[in-house]
Image (tube, grey):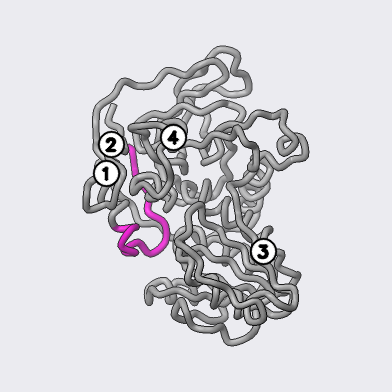
Amino acid sequence: MPAWRVTRPGPMPSKPVELVRTPVPRPGAGELLVRVLVCGVCRTDLHVAEGDLPVHRPGVTPGHEVVGEVAGLGAGVSGFGAGDRVGIAWLRGTCGACRYCRRGRENLCPDSRYTGWDADGGYAEYAVVPAAYALPLPGGYSDDELAPLLCAGLIGYHALARADLPDGGRLGIYGFGGSAHLTAQVAIARGATVHVMTRSAEARELAMALGAASAADAASPPPEPLDSAILFAPVGELVLPALAALDRGGTLAVAGIHLSDVPPLNYQRHLFQERQVRSVTANTRADAREFLAFAGRHRLAVSTVPYALDAADRALADLAADRVNGAAVLRAT
């Protein structure tokens, strides 16, 4: 089967990914073999390809927003049958026994494993996933629309929780790509006022079309103080204006797995009056099921840009250059 590999991590112009042919994987005990229909292209895939994240599996196949059909069952798997539609997300495995797992915070498990980083992901015709980490998919969406929900949607949903947005609050969103355009809709559906700051004029237009109260350049101040903010752009310099825009007691959640260096903070300007910064680390399976159920009840507008599987390198390059307005998806069929 065709599959992409990260062979030489580095900037996209250096061609860090390569399309190869490899045998169809076999599911091990407790695993599902999944025929990939669509795989989303996430900025985390870009961080893996460009070497921003350390290599966990040499030659890994990226991709962790997989919409597919069960094509085979490993030993001991029950509850699934051939042809069942499932999603494969970033979180792939946890120990189940540590103090974090025991208290429902498996995303912090020291032994956690991730699709497309620790194990091969969905930039291929087939992928395997532990059955315990395969996710149910809501109805009412196309395959293209479902794929971004499996990471962009999930991490945005978790980031929104970490941002501690009060009912009817004012939310600032910094950066407006695949994750942010979904998170904005969740917040608006819950009654929030959303202000978007992003450098892309097309993204600002999309934000306004989706119901944002305002959309301005990334470093511009919002038109009113914010109760909460989420930083999606992997740009550490934006932490300062985001904190400065917070009202007293406000919270900034940093949603990326990678962030460039944050400049020095001024305590009085950025943190005093109980402003706080929180990081965001993956999501739990409970988060995933809760968000996907929400998406089933509230029809989200998912903006996607399709690419053929054999154009994954171009999709990553377009993402790196901010040429994707919404979420890029790879069609494997």
Placement of 233 over or under 81, stated as above or below: below
Determine the secondary structure under disc 1: loop
Q: Residues within 10 Å of mark 3 (few under 14, many from 20)?
A: many
Quadrant the N terminus occupies: top left
Q: Are marks 2 and 1 in contact (CB under 8 Å)?
A: yes
Residue closest to the eye, 71 or 277? 277
How far is disc 2 from disc 3 in space, using C-alphas? Answer: 37 Å
Residue at x 65%, y 28% (from the top left corner): 95
| Type of the residue with mark 1 | Pro
Give the label on residue 201, or none. Answer: none
* Residue 248 in which image quadrant: bottom right
Magenta-highlighted residues: 318-333
| Residue type, mark 4 in image | His
- Left or right for 49, reference 280: left
Q: Residues within 10 Å of mark 4 (few under 14, many from 20)?
A: some
> Height in image: 214 above or below 131?
below
Q: Which residue is nearer to you in this view: 239 or 329?
A: 239
Residue placed at 41% from the left, 32% from the top? Answer: 57
Residue at the disc numbered 3:
163
Tell me which residue sits at (51%, 66%) in the image. Answer: 262
For mark 2, what is the residue?
Answer: 7
The mark nearer the N terminus, 2 or 4, is 2
Residue 252 versus residue 268: which sits nearer the camera? Answer: 268
Q: Earlier in the sequence, mark 2 or mark 3?
A: 2
Is disc 2 placed on a helix, strand or loop?
Answer: loop
Label 1, on which residue? Answer: 16
Q: Is there CB contact under 8 Å for labels 2 and 3?
A: no
Q: Which residue bears the numbered disc 4?
A: 56
- Indicate which label's residue lies in the foreground, 3 or 4: 4
